[in-house]
Image (tube, grey):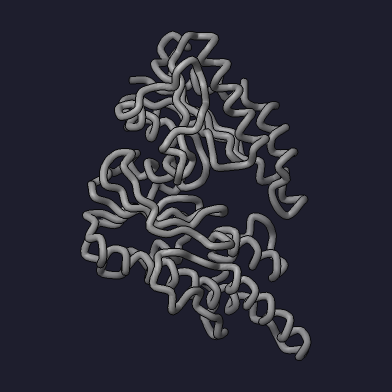
């Protein structure tokens, strides 16, 4: 089965083509980072406008790279949510138009489910499996009982971990996007500053990073008021140590309770070297699968892979309707 997928949930415009739920024939991704750097973050209206400008070209590039024509496409998939409404609508309209013009079935895929299935590109999902999704907008622990049979064990109560990274970077005066920079500087410093561990006494699988972000802000302000030197590398190392411990401890407890056969870590923050090192060096007594670096951030290849397995269970949408389905509850 040949699937063409569209992803435009935030500031990456992407069109991909996959074969049989595994092979990636093309994965066109256009990032808007350079555009939004001037604003210190993603501006929704600007992101949507740039999706419109480049979407058609990415369709053409994907088909050319895969050496296919629209007649070769068996299914069209599109990210339905969550994400920025304006950006999502650009991708949805493009996918609907392409599907209708060429009489191809259409399927709507949850963006977060796509991040889970990014691991399927180079590995095999083994059930039951536990997924830790870490990105700019989401931090979730999800139990995978089978393909598209998921239970959310816990999610973020406020800031997601990736959002906290970017906000801390802004507090420290670092460039946007700040998450990768904080990760880089953390390896140059030492965790010498004392920062609180979020929800340290909470027994659920929920996450919270807003208080940690505020603690960094208070640390920076107090240091400036005392006219002391602020060791930015050490602040980054201290912040990252707490983030990694929080993610690891919650995940470890979930593994003990649910006994999965595999741990999948996906989402943009899964590219963080500190997080990867922690989960790989610890003896969790089960395989730990990270999405490949190029498939951690938002792109349509993961949507195409997820669509293949979703189609096996749910089929396509009727009359190109994009009404919410049970899979969009995550």
Could you tell me which residue is drawn at 37 percent across and 20 percent down? 2
Could you tell me which residue is drawn at 64 percent across and 35 percent down? 87
Could you tell me which residue is drawn at 35 percent across and 45 percent down? 119
Q: Position of residue 142 (x, y in %)?
A: 37, 53
Q: Is residue 115 left or right of residue 218?
A: left
Q: Position of residue 234 (x, y in %)?
A: 58, 79
Q: Is residue 202 left or right of residue 130?
A: right
Between 201 and 105, the residue placed more toward the observer is: 201
Could you tell me which residue is drawn at 70 percent across and 64 percent down? 170
Q: Is residue 107 visible?
A: yes
- Vertical relation: 325 (above or below) 76: below
Q: Position of residue 141 (x, y in %)?
A: 39, 57
Quadrant housing the N terminus: top left
- Vertical relation: 108 (above or below) 45: above
Asked which quadrant contains residue 94, the reply is top right
Q: Position of residue 190 (x, y in %)?
A: 52, 80
- Vertical relation: 44 (above or below) 321: below
């Amino acid at each position: 089965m040949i699937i063409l997928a569209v992803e435009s949930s935030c500031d990456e415009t992407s069109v991909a083509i996959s074969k049989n739920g595994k092979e990636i024939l093309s994965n066109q991704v256009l990032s808007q980072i350079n555009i939004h750097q001037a604003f210190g973050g993603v501006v929704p209206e600007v992101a949507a406008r740039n999706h419109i400008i480049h979407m058609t070209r990415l369709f053409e590039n994907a088909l050319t790279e895969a050496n296919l024509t629209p007649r070769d496409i068996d299914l069209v998939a599109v990210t339905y949510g969550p994400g920025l409404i304006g950006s999502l609508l650009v991708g949805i309209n493009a996918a609907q138009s392409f599907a209708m013009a060429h009489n191809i079935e259409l399927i709507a895929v949850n963006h977060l489910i796509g991040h889970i299935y990014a691991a399927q590109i180079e590995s095999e999902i083994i059930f039951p499996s536990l997924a830790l999704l870490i990105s700019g907008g989401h931090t979730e622990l999800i139990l995978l009982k089978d393909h598209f049979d998921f239970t959310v064990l816990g999610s973020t109560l406020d800031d997601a971990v990736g959002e906290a990274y970017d906000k801390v970077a802004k507090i420290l005066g670092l460039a946007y996007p700040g998450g990768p920079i904080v990760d880089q500087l953390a390896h140059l410093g030492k965790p010498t500053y004392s920062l609180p561990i979020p929800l340290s006494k909470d027994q659920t699988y929920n996450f919270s990073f807003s208080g940690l972000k505020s603690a960094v802000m208070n640390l920076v302000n107090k240091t400036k008021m005392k006219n002391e030197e602020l060791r930015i590398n050490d602040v980054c190392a201290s912040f990252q140590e707490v983030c990694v411990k929080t993610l690891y401890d919650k995940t470890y407890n979930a593994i003990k309770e649910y006994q999965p056969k595999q741990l999948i870590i996906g989402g943009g923050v899964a590219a963080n070297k500190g997080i990867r090192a922690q989960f790989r060096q610890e003896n969790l007594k089960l395989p730990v699968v990270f999405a490949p670096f190029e498939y951690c951030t938002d792109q349509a290849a993961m949507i195409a892979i997820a669509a293949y397995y979703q189609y096996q269970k749910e089929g396509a949408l009727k009359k190109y309707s994009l009404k919410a389905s049970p899979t969009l509850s995550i």
